[in-house]
Structures are given as structure tokens and as C-alpha cells.
Amino acid sequence: MALNLTPITLRNQLFLFSFNSKSSRNSRLSFNSNYYHSFHLPKPLFPFSSSPYSPSSWLCHIPRVTTAPVEYAPPAPDFDFSQEIARLNILRSRLSDSTNLNEKHSVVDKDATVKQFFCTNQNDGFSTVLASLNLDSYELFLVKCLVAAGQEHVLSFGSQPVQSESELARSSLKSALYALVEMIDKLDVDRVGGNGGVDIKISFALNHEEIEAIKKLLKTLGEIEQFYDCIGGIIGYQITVLELLARETCNRQATNWSQTRTESKECQFLDIHAPSGLDLSQSTEYASQAAIWGIEGLSDLGEIYPLGGSADRLGLVDPDTGECLPAAMLPYCGRTLLEGLIRDLQAREFLYFKLYGKQCITPVAMMTSSAKNNHERITSLCERLGWFGRGRSSFKLFEQPLVPTVSAEDGQWLVAKPFVPVCKPGGHGVLWKLAYDKGIFKWFYEHGRKGATVRQVSNVVAATDLTLLALAGIGLHHGKKLGFASCERQLGATEGINVLIEKKNLDGRWTYGLSCIEYTEFDKFGITNGPLSPESLQARFPANTNILYVDLHSAELVGSSENENSLPGMVLNIKKPVVYVDHFGKQQRLECTMQNIADSFFSTSSSPFYGRVEDNLDTFIVYNERRRVTSSAKRKRKHADKSLHQTPDGSLLDILRNAHNLLSNCDIRLPEIKGNDVYVDSGPPFLLLLHPALGPLWEVTRQKFHGGSISKGSELQIEVAEFLWRNVQLDGSLIIMAEHVMGSVRIDENDEPILQYGQRCGRCKLQNVKVLNKGIDWNSGNNVYWKHDVQRLETFKVILYGNAEFEATDVVLEGNHVFEVPNGYKMKIEPGRPGLSVQLDPIEPSIMDSGSWFWNYQIKGSHIQLELVEL
């Protein structure tokens, strides 16, 4: 008896048999590319001389990059990318020409890889498995596509690397027989006698876990085939992966590109410039006007949150279950990151109400994924919080597909165990096509929206002051298709850059537009990713922050384009490897970048643009100080790590620096915030957390605060929008909490709680007050400052229920106190004889809705002025 079987060891110590084939992939790889240098003087691009990125400040060019071919052939790699890409391209083309599923089956059945894998004398066992699963015709087609894409190992009963034919030949009969003995419990063996001979028929008995894994695999394959239909489904996905890997291999092996550059009159080349735009921190009058446009247009805007990322670098786990959590669930400053985004949005809506007296509920679309139960956890959080008092109908959650992670060497999919490829979200660039596929644009239109702002959940400062409002205001007012909020880059930042592209096409026409280059792609453009310095090329480009304004109709046209344009910025992020360790070594996944939708909005001219290039573009960019634009909680800080960049600790310091900047201009004395290294050793100099509805524009907030001081080691938390601070000296802990910050809650016809913006909310006045107590125990080892989880020795705390009011005038509030003011009442604390006089009175019915005082907001030119109205 001869057995042609390959033993493969499973983690559960059973031995099964894998039927695999591997085509010869050892031909030479040849790639061509030209590389030109351009040293001509740049022409002026934008008139904003105050911008740190304007040509009047400095000039910035990098070498021209051309897509014309060059003669360059690196040494033959272990895996022949060109041969495999050519094979798959032929298959994709034939599948594309097929008009129905039967024709597609016919095409894929002719593929040599599929033929070899499904050969009867080699794969009787697996064919039996497929038959037992009762797969329909489409599911069987998906399996064939998987095999045709060279990923037959995913279907193996084991997770070891595929053996070559020579290795199979060297397998001894002893090994095969040993494996057969070990797998008896797994296999059913039927003996059929005939002429004294014995035939052995092996049928595979799958357990429940394996059947469920196959079902999940089919679901994943179906999602890839459907979502990536614009590039050819599963086959197109693998082609794109291999093309990008081949390019990276070529780049790594071409050690000196400059030696290979040649001249060509017909080449396509492009110049990369640093983009110019409005600097919000310098052009303050225009920035204020732009913010007013943003407030006026709030009823035309939607909000988009890409929440599908796996956020592996945060290392976030559920303390009760130990399960991994997505970034949206990170407990930050007393609430999850997702709650922080909604608070920022509601602050803008409250400002709209205060100015125009109308309710505005912005529809929010959230792109989730199944990674770390992301979709279920976010849905559960929203339900638990009553959809934030906005109603279920104002939210639209849509789930992005997961994509396989691949080996950087040959594009092979990682496999955790039989039938289970390791999958991760495919990047936020899938947003536009997915939004079209899931009807998100149509949903926005039904809510009367024209544009949308986009921000990522990990960026905790994106809504600071007027950045978001000015961005949206300019986009709406000038009818732009896309806008970027940007800032200067920072040392050690794993972030891309914004660029202005000037390109001469082969037909002689010129193309211009704003775009982005991911940090993983810097080498291709001659940009080094080393330490930043004033002289370094990359320091001259502003940071890409993934804060966008987008015209919905324009974005929909891209998402519905049915070609690769609907998946902008496809990259393999080699510099951010997947956190997964197995025999495949270095891994990555195909990602798309949402900001590269800008590449679809370039402007073309028959001649070069001179002068005001920005006037001719459908895209634009605004700048602000970095800590008012981006500060992310993306990675967990290691215990001994001195760097706070992109950690919750570092972003908290940026919040405190913003608060210091805000209040120090209100004639309030605050401690100096020193460098990050001081924080590592001793923590922040104070904690200061203000509800965004106090503004959110700083010019609004500053009219509510004036005079006084905040001592080192103090804590101030204000969760009230109707608030007055006049000459308050704080030395210790002061917390003012309102149950209803921006209005009251009503129950609508769907029995849902809805926040009704209005005057019926908590309010607080502090005038000529000293607050003295022991405050936070800064010596406690249990303090986690960025969570606002701290131990206190003493605090002065006020809790306002409903529309309760609290006033303190000309008093010293010393020691540990908690005052709770019930709904419909006003508490006043004044000097008494002796001590303090505390008076609690009901609010008069005639002023129950408006309160005994309120701030009246009015637009004066391009500014907002507040008037204190007392009744």
C-alpha cells in the first residue's frame, strides 16, 4: 500500500493531511522607472504671506518623480512577483468578461492552480469536506478564487508552511505511517475487499469549531469579493498586494536611484511643493469670519467618524473580561473617546442654538468593523447612553470589511489556524466606497446635508477653538470639494504630509491639486523619515492630520466610480507591522487612506498656473497651532518610556497647554507647564478640564472668565455651559457638575430621550471667591491623570440637577464640601455672621425656563459678543 500524504502537525497534537500545490515562481523580476531632478526656482503659489508654509517664508521643492520606464532589473528574488501578477491579471481579465456565475466558474476552473488543487487523485478528502458543507455555487466560486489567488494553504488542515514537491518526495514512509496512527481518532477508515486487496478511503470529519471557521471564512471571502469588486474582487485584491510588494522589493534593492535616472522627452513628471493656505493663528479676522460661516452652515453639515481601526498599539483591554477593546472605548478624562467626540459636536450645536434660537441635530455616520467586536461594542455604548440624547435615527453605523494580513516576502495570507486567516480592518480609505455601498450619502441627503466634517476618534483636540468650524465654513462658503486642517510636523511623528502636486501630463497639459503622502511612502519621493530639523526636507511640509471637510456629492461620485479611484491611497504599511507572530515573519495588510480622495479632485490646465494657484483648485488647506489641531491617544506609553508622543499622557498635556493659553488671556494666573520630561517624573502641574459648550470658540469662553488665579497642584473641572468666573482664587480642587449642561431632555414619539437645547439647564456664578482645600493627593501611586482617575484628600464640589443654580459671592470656601442643588432651586452662598450664609430658594415659576440669568449671544461683524442678562 502506498500513501501519498503530507503530515502536518496541529496545535492540538493531531496529525492531518494537507493537499497543497505551489507553482514555480522563480523568474527574474524587471521594473522600470525614471527619476528626474528639478532645480528651477519655484513660482509663487499662494498670497498668504503670514502662513508658515507660504513661499515668502521659504521655498520647498523635492526632486521631480516620473512614471516613465527605466532599465532596471534587481537580482532575482525568492518569489517571482512578475510571473504571478501576470497570471492573475489574465485570470482577472477573463473573469471580468464573464457575464454570469456559470461563466466565472468555467474561467476559474481552467486556472492551472485550481486544477492542480482540486485534482481528484490528490484531494479526494477535501472534496468530501466541501460536499459535506453543502456549499452553494457562489460559495464554491469563492473557494476557487482563494485557491486561484495562491492562498490554498488557508484551506489546509494545519498552519505550517507549504512543503515543496522535493520535500514531499523526501518524506519517509515511516513518517507517513506514524502520522496515520496519530490521526485515527480524527478520520473514518472504510475497508473494501476485492481480489484480496484492500482500498483505504479516508473521509474527513470536521468538528463544530472547524465548520464555524469555514463559514466565517466564506463570509470574509464574500465581503472581499463584493467590496473589492472595483479592482477585481479576491483576485484583484491579491494582484494589488503583489504589485505593491513588488514595488517595495524593487525600491529596497535599488540602492541608488539617482544612478539610474535618464532623460526622456515623453515622461510624466511631477513637482512636490509645500502647500500654502490660511493660517488661522495669524489671519485672525478672516479665521473668525470663517468660523461664523461654519456655525451658520451647521444645519447643512454631517459628521463622519471612522472608528473601525483595531488600535493594537493602545493595548486596551476590558478590565472585567480581559477582552481587547477598540480605541473608541478608551476611558479618557472621565469618559470614552467616542463620548468626547459627541460632546464636541453638541457644543457646536449649542452655540448654534444660542445664536439662532433653533434646534440643530447633526446626523453622525460611524464606520465600524468587526475587529475586537468593534461594531457591537460601539452599538452597545450608544444604546447604554440613550444615543447621547440625539435619537437613534440621527446615527448611521456601517461596518467595514476585514482584509487578510500578508507576508511581506510573497504576499501569502497569514493563517492563525485551519480556515482562519488573520484579518484586520482595511484602513479608513475604504470609507468612501463603503459609504456609497451602504447608502450613507443618500442618508445624509435625506437629512438635508451638503457637506461633512471627518475626524478620527483618537485625536482629542481636533475641535479646539475654531479649527473645525473654520474648515467647514470655508468649504461650504466657497463651494470646495475637499479641505484639510493641517499644522507643523513633530519630531517622531508617524504621520503623513500634505503636499501640493504640480504635474505635467504626457499630453502636455498641467495638473494641480492638494494631496497627501503617507510616512510609509516617503522614500519613493526622496523624503527621508529621520529626525526632524529646520534644514530637513520633510520638516518643510505640514502634517496630514486626517481632519477633513468634504462635499458629499463630490465624495459620492468618487465612492461610486466602480474603479480603483473609489479606494484611494492603497498602500502596504510596511513601517507599521501587524502585531502577530508566527512563521511567516514580517507581515502587513493592504490599506487605503481616506485623505487621498483628494487625488480625484485635481484641476487641469493647458498651461502652468502662476500666482494664485489656490483660486483654481477645488481643494484647500487651513493651518493652526499643532496642539489646536492634532494630539492623539494612539499608543500605550511603556513604563520607562520618556516619549509621550501619541500617548494619552502626551495628549492630556496638550489639553492642559490649550487651557493655559485660553485662561491666561483672561487675566488668570496659572502655573507654568514645563516639558514632557517633567511630566514623566512628577505628573502635570495642575488638572484643568472645561466642558466644550463653554465655547467652543475661545472668544466665547474668554468672556465667561476673568481674573483670579489657579495654584500649582490644583484641579478645576467645569461641566456647565452657563457659567461666570470673576476673580476666583483656586488652591485645591473645585468641581462644578451639571446634570443638564446645554438644555433639558424630553421624550419623543419613539419613546427616546432627546436633548432639547435651551436655557433650562444648570448654571453657576462665582464672584470674588477663594477656594482652599487639600485637593488631589499627588503622592498617590494610583493616580492616572489622563483618565482623570485621581485620589483626592479634599474637594469643593457642586452638583446641579435639572435647571438648578449655584452662586457664591465674596466668600472663602475652605475644606471638603459637596453641595447638591435640586432641580428648580437656587443656592446662594454669601458672607454670614459668623461664617457663611447658605440659602436655598425655589426658582420663580415665571423664570423657570430661562433661569434667573443667562448669557445672550450676538454676532457683531465677524465676532460673537456675550451679554449677561439678569432677570
Image: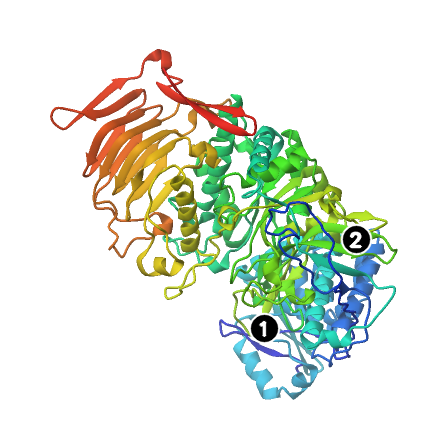
From the viewer's side, name the closer residue of 577 and 102.
577
Residue shown at the point (49%, 39%) measured from the top left: 465
Give the answer, above or below, for where 673 lies relative to 442: below
From the viewer's side, name the closer residue of 696 and 758.
696
Q: Which mark is residue 101?
A: 2
* Residue 715 place in picture, x, y as percent: 30, 44
Whichever of callouts 2 and 1 sits on the residue coming sooner in the sequence is: 2
Q: Secondary structure at mark 2?
A: helix
Of the residues shown, which amino acid type is indicated by label 1? Answer: Phe
* Residue 518 place in picture, x, y as percent: 63, 59
Q: Is residue 500 visible?
A: yes
Crowd around label 2: few <14 · some 14–19 · many ≥20 (10 Å): few
Residue shown at the point (40%, 65%) measured from the top left: 641
Of the residues shown, which amino acid type is indicated by label 2? Answer: Leu
Looking at the rendered image, the quarter that the C terminus falls into is top left
Alpha-carbon span between mark 2 and mark 1: 34 Å
**Left or right, 806 with reference to 510:** left
Residue shown at the point (37%, 55%) measured from the top left: 674
**Left or right, 142 with reference to 624:** right
Q: Which mark is residue 809?
A: none
Q: Is residue 317 visible?
A: no
**Left or right, 112 with reference to 161:** right
Q: Which quadrant of the figure has residue 706?
A: top left
* Residue 18 place in picture, x, y as percent: 63, 73
Give the answer, above or below, for where 176 lies relative to 551: below
Q: Which residue is mark 1?
A: 584
Crowd around label 1: few <14 · some 14–19 · many ≥20 (10 Å): some
